[in-house]
Image (cartoon, helix red, strand yellow):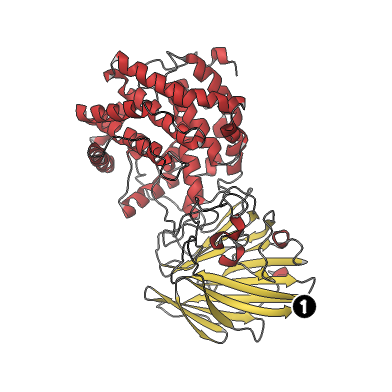
Amino acid sequence: MNPDNLLNNLHVEHPRLMLKNDRFSELKKLSETDTTLQSYVTKSIKEADKALTKPLLEHKIPDGLRLLGTSRDCMARVYALGLAWRWTGEQKYADNLLENILAVCNFPDWNPRHFLDTAEMSHAVGVAYDWLYPVLSETDRVTIQNGLIQHGLEPGLKAYAGTESYGWWVKCDHNWNQVCNAGLIVGALAIAETHPQYAQQIIPQAVESLPRALKMYGPDGAWAEGPGYWGYATRYTMFGFAALDTALGTDFDLLKIEGMSQAGLSPIYTTGPTGMYLAYADCGERPHHSPMASMFWLASVFNDPFVADAEHRLIAKTDRVSPQHVVWYVPQPNSEIAHPSLDKRFRGPVELALFRSAWNDVNALWVGIKAGYNEANHSHLDLGNFELDALGVRWARDLGSDNYNMPGYFGDQRWEYYRLISKSHNIPTLNGQEQDPSGTATLTQFDTTGTFPHAQIDLTKGYLNQTKSIVRGTALINNRRAVLVQDEFELSEKTNIAWGITTDANIEIAGTTATLTQDGQTLKAHILSPTGATFTVESAEQGPPEKTNEGVKRLMIHLPDQLNQARISVLFSPQWPEGDNITKTEVIPLSKW
């Protein structure tokens, strides 16, 4: 693109970012008849009222590294207070927001060494400047412009130029890319009519950088860093694209990148009936799918009523909504939305297979399994990991991430921490070793036809130099009322195999059967193969500084001194109240699935 022509179509008037006056007028009119929108606005204004009682934002780096908490607090206040002022016209909201924006513009810096902080603050200050523009004095405008330039845009230009070490994110392929590029795009467009040189320099470089990360949605919309970072990355993708669209009328064809149009399906499918995600990578503990305004944005730009309907249902269920849901509001479809298939395969750098017995049933059976590669940003050593929901309970779980500030968490001590290594996940280990940190796994089968929906993952390259071959199969059986997990090994030497799952349930062992009870429900696990194997129970608890995992258990199978070939086949049978709970099924070699 030609920087000289970049701003030819700039919407010169303010507000130009996210919510222009014509769209705002549409929302106001719609709210006269749309009671759902009315309720979202009411809750957003209540959030603004809470913001009025908070102390002034301060430059705080509590962990010695991140200003991010302050940046995110600022962003939340901008949307809450800014929307409340625009909706009600009450000056108290604008006054409070301006006071906080002037405060952050007078910070000594926005902590560019951890550039997420700088980018999020640039976004927040840019939107505040744009929305408050009509009531800003000339002195206030200059103060905010100078703060944005000095603390945000100038450090951003140094990042693109590669003259500062904190600019590494320009060439990365994960969430930092979207957050940093989008934050700078928003900040540059906010002051583009008075300081065009920043938009002319930043936007071309951001548009060049963004595809490195956006391609990671391809081809089906999932995200290698896990569902938690899907939310973060997609939120800032929304901010950046929406700013380009409202200010310039173009997204430079970035929305055409493969996978973007399918991205809204990812958090829906990776959420089990319990409301918890398939928690691969650095996902939080017991991570629940919470409402995200980016779902409305995706539903709008890709005309996807299923995604819009799913977000409305989630808001109704959780009673949580943000001011951004008002900004990107999409009415709930009037007619019943046909659900897509029960099962979904997400291809890409990290591959997922998801199966369920029903939609919109908290007691439904659901299983998710992960393939891909262990070098993905925020990845754990968890190739082949699965999680299982049934009867409203998460029976097989992932412990989630640990404290990012522990020594070497993102460095040379990463694979010393229990929650990140193979031994804490629902996968086999061989001779006590972890998976290869550079290992990969491929989803080789995904078949949802007939009465045996299943997936297979070739895990061999995830256990490099540990075995000749290891393949995991996962299937829903008995009319989607039970789950079969089967692992087959070709061994290159005498091998001790440890097979396990992590669970919060109470466990009683009776030989080849383990009875798991939790929240008044029961699931039975049956060893179908090998003959003579039995279950044992171990503790997943750890000592500080790691999270302690209090009360968490490991249901284990140990097979010592295995030679040549081995197979572990386990049937998970939820004890449905209506009966028909199977205890066995034929063990069929994976090659014949």
Q: Position of residue 99 (x, y in %)?
A: 28, 28
Q: Position of residue 109 (x, y in %)?
A: 43, 29
Q: Is residue 480 visible?
A: no
Left-right relation of 28 to 496: left
Q: Position of residue 38 (x, y in %)?
A: 25, 40
Near-viewer residue (109 or 376): 109
Q: Amino acid at mark 1?
A: Leu
Left-right relation of 138 to 108: left
Q: Vertically, is 490 above or below 225?
A: below
Q: Position of residue 417 (x, y in %)?
A: 56, 60
Image quadrant occupied by the N terminus: top right
Q: Residues within 10 Å of mark 1 (few under 14, many from 20)?
A: some
Q: What residue sits 59% from the left and 29% below the top?
A: 164
Q: What residue sits 62% from the left and 81% below the top?
A: 528
Dot 1: element: loop
Q: Provide the residue designation for mark 1.
A: 563
Near-viewer residue (376 or 114): 114
Q: What residue sits 61% from the left and 78% below the top?
A: 557
Q: Is residue 246 visible?
A: yes
How many callouts does the rendering have?
1
Q: What residue sits 60% from the left and 55% below the top?
A: 413
Q: Residue 532 occupies which quadrant of the picture?
A: bottom right
Image quadrant occupied by the C terminus: bottom right
Q: Vertically, is 271 above or below 98?
A: below
